Amino acid sequence: MSLRGRIDRVSDGQWWFCLKHMRVEPDKGCPNKDRLGPYASEQEAAGALQRAADRNKAWDEADLDDDD
């Protein structure tokens, strides 16, 4: 089986957040280089930007703690 066949099977029914169009997309959408995901549900994909912001904030705070 080709790698492409395995990737297609893994991504079936998954959702993405498109950074180019700032919207949730199903698997058949923009190229993955322009998206966050995959996520198991449309609702999870809709929260992708907030999740990324929360993680960035936590990492920044951890970096400040390491500087002490």
Image (spheres, rainbow, N blue to C red):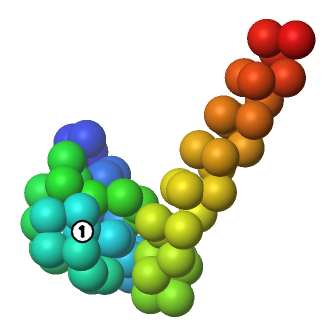
Q: Tell me which corner region of the image, top left, top right, bottom left or bottom right, holds residue 10.
A: bottom left
Q: Amino acid at mark 1?
A: Cys
Vertical placement of residue 65 versus 44, above or below: above
Residue at the spot 19% in from the left edge and 47% down from the top edge: 33
Task: Please give the name of the residue rendered at 26% of the width and 81% of the height, measured from the top-left corner.
Answer: 23
Q: Please indicate whether residue 29 sits to the left or right of residue 17 in the image.
A: left
Q: Nearer the viewer, residue 67 or 25?
A: 67
- Classify mark 1: residues with Cα within 10 Å, few (<14), some (14-19) or many (20+): many
In this rendering, the answer to whether 26 lies above or below 49 is below
Indicate the quadrant containing the N terminus: top left, top right, bottom left or bottom right. top left
Q: Which residue is mark 1?
A: 18
Quarter of the image with the C terminus in it: top right
Viewer can see residue 10: no
Q: Nearer the viewer, residue 5 or 64?
A: 64
Q: Nearer the viewer, residue 11 or 5?
A: 11
Q: Residue at x 34, y 71 (%)?
A: 16
Left or right of residue 31: residue 51: right
Q: Position of residue 56 (x, y in %)?
A: 59, 44
Regarding residue 59, the answer to whether it shows in the image is yes
Seen at 14% across and 74% down, the residue is: 21
- Outermost residue on the bottom side: it is 43
Q: Position of residue 20 (x, y in %)?
A: 14, 64
